[in-house]
Amino acid sequence: MGSYSGYGPPITMDITPLITLLATRIGIRLGWQDRQNGQALIEYSLIMVLVVCVILVTLIVLGNQVRNTYCNIAGAVVNP
C-alpha cells in the first residue's frame, strides 16, 4: 500500500493555496468581505445577549414593583 507502482515519479501537489482561493471566492459570493465583519457581528451578538440577560434579571427581581408602578400610572391616567 505504501509503494508507488505508476510510471515516473509520483506527482505531489500542495493544494492549500487552491483551498484558500476557493474559500475566498465562496466568501465573496456569500457577501463576507473579511473576517472583521464576522467578528464584529459575533461581538455585537454577545453584547446583545448580555443586555437581554441583564434586563431579564432586573425584571425578575423588580417585576412586582414595576407592575405596581405601571398600574398606579395607568390608574392615574384613566381616573384623573
Image (spheres, rainbow, N blue to C red):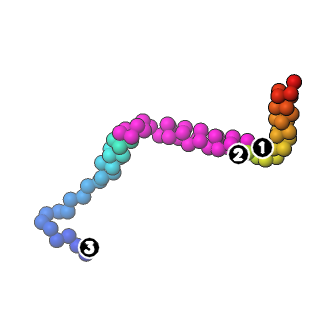
In the displayed orientation, state which residue is furthest to the left. Answer: 7
Dot 3 or dot 2: first in sequence order is 3
Looking at the image, can residue 28 be seen? yes
Which residue is painted at 86% across and 27% down in the image?
A: 79
Q: Could you tell me the amino acid type at mark 2?
A: Cys
Q: Could you tell me the amino acid type at mark 1?
A: Leu
Dot 1 or dot 2: first in sequence order is 2
Q: Could you tell me the amino acid type at mark 3?
A: Gly
Does residue 43 appear to the left or right of 63 in the view shown? left
Q: Which residue is mark 2?
A: 53
Circle 2 sits in a helix, a strand or a loop, which is it? helix
- Identify the disc placed on residue 79: none
Looking at the image, can residue 62 be seen? no
How far apart marks 3 and 1 lie (CA) works out to 67 Å
Q: Which residue is mark 3?
A: 2
Q: Which residue is mark 1?
A: 59
- Which mark lies nearer to you, 1 or 2? 1
Q: Quadrant of residue 1?
A: bottom left
What is the span of residues highlighted in magenta in the rendered image? 28-55
Which residue is painted at 26% across and 55% down in the image?
A: 13
Circle 3 sits in a helix, a strand or a loop, which is it? loop
Taking depth in this image into account, of 58 and 7 the one nearest to the observer is: 58
Principal SS element in the magenta part? Answer: helix
Circle 1 sits in a helix, a strand or a loop, which is it? helix
